[in-house]
């Protein structure tokens, strides 16, 4: 028999501390952990934010999407000593391949632990981005001349809206991170940019590509809490004058890359009135007003300001 309490504690320690776990939770609902005959079933509900872990004497009648077979000693070494877990095996559940195959690699990242620096940078586009934005082939939109930074468009990534994302601002070759966030070790440039918009509002996605080019050209950074505005006063073909830069709330606000953490800077479309008030109060206050009005993490090319005209000075 296994030490149920210690196994439960080890699993909870790993899941609560590993930055890959929120990505697994977005894509899977049940994972079983086998320890000989005994089983712990992990149940996840991303929409409700619920996680449950329950012991079973056997696997009979259980229907996980994936099975993980691991020795308790390997689990304890990973959870309590920070050592890399070895000798575990991942298999599909009784219904076969119901999850995207990359989810097996994602849960392997969670279980194995150890030296994350050895994980390839390609995890960002091959593992992290698909887990966040869907497993369809992204459309390349822009690429830095002679460099490794690009912008990708994931169709239908968020309630029918497209995700426009940078990839490469967090590469090691770009130098030290501009981020200093207590409790985290930011990875390299420390952030990537993301924008959500309807397919017909591609003009906004093109603006994100322009700002990524700006970062690459100037080595300036676009960080949470700032705003972006245009000398012309308005983005062409829109009623917006720029963007507020905030953390997203519909996707995890950070993701692991090698031995560091990358944070998202979400571009949220803003009118001229909203930007002026944000300068006087705070970006987060105006972003919250947009969220309250239903513009949760996504931008649209044409809308009324959420700031009354009388507030604009």
Image (cartoon, rainbow, N blue to C red):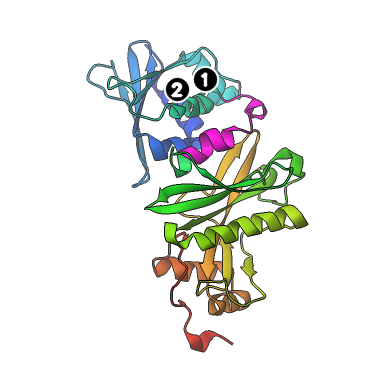
Vertical relation: 2 (above or below) 283: above
Q: Is residue 304 visible?
A: yes
Give the labeled residue for mark 1. Answer: 76
Q: Is residue 215 left or right of residue 160?
A: right
Find the magenta span and give its range: 113-130
Q: Earlier in the sequence, mark 2 or mark 1?
A: 2
Q: Nearer the viewer, mark 2 or mark 1?
A: 1
User: Where does residue 5 sit, x and y in percent of width and height?
Assistant: 41, 24
Q: Is residue 111 left or right of residue 166?
A: left
Q: Is residue 219 visible?
A: no
Vertical relation: 89 (above or below) 193: above
Tell me, yes or no, whether the two marked residues, 2 and 1, touch with CB atoms within 8 Å: yes
Residue drawn at (64%, 76%), measured in percent from left and top? 232
Element carrying mark 2: helix
Q: Of 25 and 37, which appears nearest the observer?
A: 25
Which image quadrant: the N terminus?
top left
Give the labeled residue for mark 2. Answer: 6
């Amino acid at each position: 028999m296994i030490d149920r309490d210690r196994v439960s504690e080890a699993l909870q320690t790993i899941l609560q501390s590993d930055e890959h776990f929120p990505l697994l939770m977005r894509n899977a609902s049940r994972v079983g952990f086998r320890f000989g005959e005994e089983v712990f079933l992990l149940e996840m509900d991303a929409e409700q934010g619920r996680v449950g872990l329950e012991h079973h004497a056997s696997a009979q009648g259980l229907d996980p999407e994936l099975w993980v077979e691991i020795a308790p000693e390997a689990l304890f070494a990973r959870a309590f000593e920070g050592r890399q877990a070895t000798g575990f095996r991942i298999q599909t559940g009784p219904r076969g391949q119901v999850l995207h195959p990359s989810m097996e690699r994602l849960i392997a990242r969670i279980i194995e632990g150890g030296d994350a620096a050895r994980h390839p940078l390609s995890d960002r586009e091959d593992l992290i981005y698909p887990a966040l934005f869907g497993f369809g082939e992204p459309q390349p939109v822009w690429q830095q001349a002679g460099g490794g930074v690009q912008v990708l468009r994931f169709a239908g990534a968020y309630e029918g809206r497209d995700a426009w994302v940078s990839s490469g601002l967090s590469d090691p070759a770009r130098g030290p991170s501009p981020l200093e966030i207590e409790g985290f070790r930011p990875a390299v440039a420390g952030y990537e940019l993301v924008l959500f918009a309807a397919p017909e509002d591609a003009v906004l996605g093109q603006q994100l590509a322009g700002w990524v080019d700006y970062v690459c050209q100037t080595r300036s950074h676009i960080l949470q809490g700032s705003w972006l505005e245009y000398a012309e006063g308005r983005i062409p073909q829109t009623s917006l004058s720029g963007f507020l830069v905030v953390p997203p709330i519909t996707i995890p606000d950070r993701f692991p890359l090698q031995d560091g953490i990358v944070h998202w800077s979400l571009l949220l479309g803003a009118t001229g009135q909203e930007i002026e008030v944000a300068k006087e109060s705070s970006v987060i206050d105006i972003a919250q007003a947009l969220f309250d009005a239903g513009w949760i993490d996504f931008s649209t090319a044409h809308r009324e300001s959420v700031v009354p005209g009388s507030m604009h000075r």
